[in-house]
């Protein structure tokens, strides 16, 4: 395939999406800071969004893109609430390390 | 041209994601996540989703990441100390990640009939056929009610965030003393 090729197989986009998702899961497992764990979740959401857009392109279905739009809205709401919870946890425990946060009770 | 753009921005995506995992300071992780999201916006543009590319930059790399960096700075989050994590993560988590990745890539590579993405496909001056027109037609006719419901969802989320994060609910440390209002 020449480097100036005008077309890219859609499976490459899907592969990128699955690799990004796996990196998000790895980040979720190895990160020890509450905020970066949350960032890994956002990374997974973005990876899934990419595969949504890819399939919307494949089937010329605009509803796939609208699904991504709704995912973005829900992610915005989720980020607001999640970061508020992180602030509340930090205020109660004075730490962000997930190893030290082992009680749900504030 | 499409291939070059794809390789460059997919590389940015992967580099940003790997950098997110390797950095120990949360602010560096947040900045690399911004790189990932912005390159994803370019990939959306390559796939002909102009509206989503704009929304991705505004909502994700704009609003959400500003929120993240704001919280990182507000909480003065320092360097994280690396521990090995739980035994469950080591014994179950990482093999499952490898398994998920293997299964997904096998399915994707074996998939028949997946098309190709062409550069500039679907980009048009014709207002009846543009991506924005199609998205808004479905969004504001067929899916108007879900769209309005998301605005209520975001309103509730704002109220919840204010209620959860407002001082006065918190207790300091182990002695359970209530933080006084200031």
Image: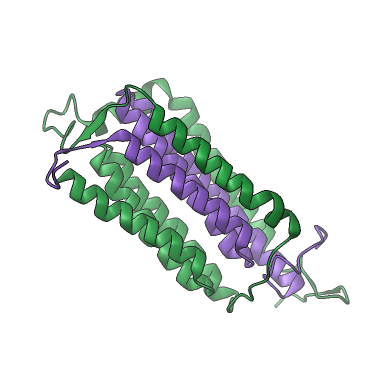
| Residue at the extreme right of the image, as rendered | B175
Left or right for B170, reference B9: right
* Rendered view: B175 above or below B141: below
Left or right for B86, reference A8: right
Q: How many marks?
A: 0
- Judging from the image, the colouring scheme is by chain
Task: Name the one closer to the observer, A17 or B62.
Answer: A17
Left or right for B126, reference B53: left
Rendering quarter of residue A12: top left
User: Residue visible at 72% across and 75% down?
Assistant: A94
* Rendered view: B138 above or below A23: above
Q: Is residue B99 visible?
A: yes
Q: Point out residue B120 in the picture as x, y percentages from the top left corner.
A: 15, 37
Write down the colour of chain B. green
Q: Point out residue A100 in the picture as x, y percentages from the top left corner.
A: 76, 69
User: Residue visible at 62% across and 67% down?
Assistant: A33
Rendering quarter of residue B76: bottom right
User: Residue visible at 67% across and 59% down?
Assistant: A85
Chain with colour purple in the figure: A
Task: Name the one closer to the observer, B142 or A100.
Answer: A100
Q: Point out residue A52 in the picture as x, y percentages from the top left corner.
A: 41, 34
* Rendered view: B37 above or below B69: above
Left or right for A102, reference B3: right
Q: Is residue A79 visible?
A: no
Quadrant assignment for the C terminus of chain B? bottom right
* Rendered view: A68 above or below A104: above
Rendering quarter of residue B172: bottom right
Q: Point out residue B156 in the picture as x, y percentages from the top left corner.
A: 60, 45
User: Residue visible at 52% across and 75% down?
Assistant: B25
């Amino acid at each position: 395939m020449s480097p100036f090729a005008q077309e890219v197989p859609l499976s490459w986009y899907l592969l990128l999406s699955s690799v990004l998702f796996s990196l998000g899961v790895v980040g979720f497992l190895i990160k020890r800071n509450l905020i970066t764990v949350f960032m890994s979740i956002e990374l997974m959401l973005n990876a899934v969004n990419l595969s949504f857009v890819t399939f919307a392109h494949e089937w010329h279905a605009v509803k796939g893109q609208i699904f991504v739009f709704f995912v973005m809205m829900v992610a915005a709401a989720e980020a607001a609430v999640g970061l508020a919870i992180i602030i509340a946890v930090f205020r109660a425990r004075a730490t962000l390390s997930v190893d030290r946060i082992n009680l749900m009770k504030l | 041209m499409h291939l070059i753009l794809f390789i460059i921005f997919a590389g940015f995506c992967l580099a940003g994601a790997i950098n997110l995992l390797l950095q120990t300071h949360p602010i560096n992780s947040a900045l690399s996540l911004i790189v990932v999201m912005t390159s994803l916006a370019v990939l959306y543009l390559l796939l002909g989703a102009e509206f989503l590319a704009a929304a991705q930059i505004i909502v994700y790399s704009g609003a959400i990441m500003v929120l993240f960096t704001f919280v990182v700075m507000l909480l003065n989050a320092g360097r994280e100390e690396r521990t090995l994590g739980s035994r469950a993560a080591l014994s179950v988590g990482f093999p499952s990640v490898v398994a998920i990745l293997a299964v997904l890539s096998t399915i994707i590579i074996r998939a028949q009939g997946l098309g190709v993405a062409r550069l500039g496909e679907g980009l048009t001056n014709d207002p009846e056929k543009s991506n924005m027109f199609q998205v808004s037609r479905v969004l504001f006719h067929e899916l108007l009610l879900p769209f309005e419901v998301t605005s209520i969802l975001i309103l509730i989320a704002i109220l919840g965030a204010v209620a959860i994060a407002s001082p006065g609910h918190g207790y300091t440390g182990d002695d359970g003393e209530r933080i006084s209002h200031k």
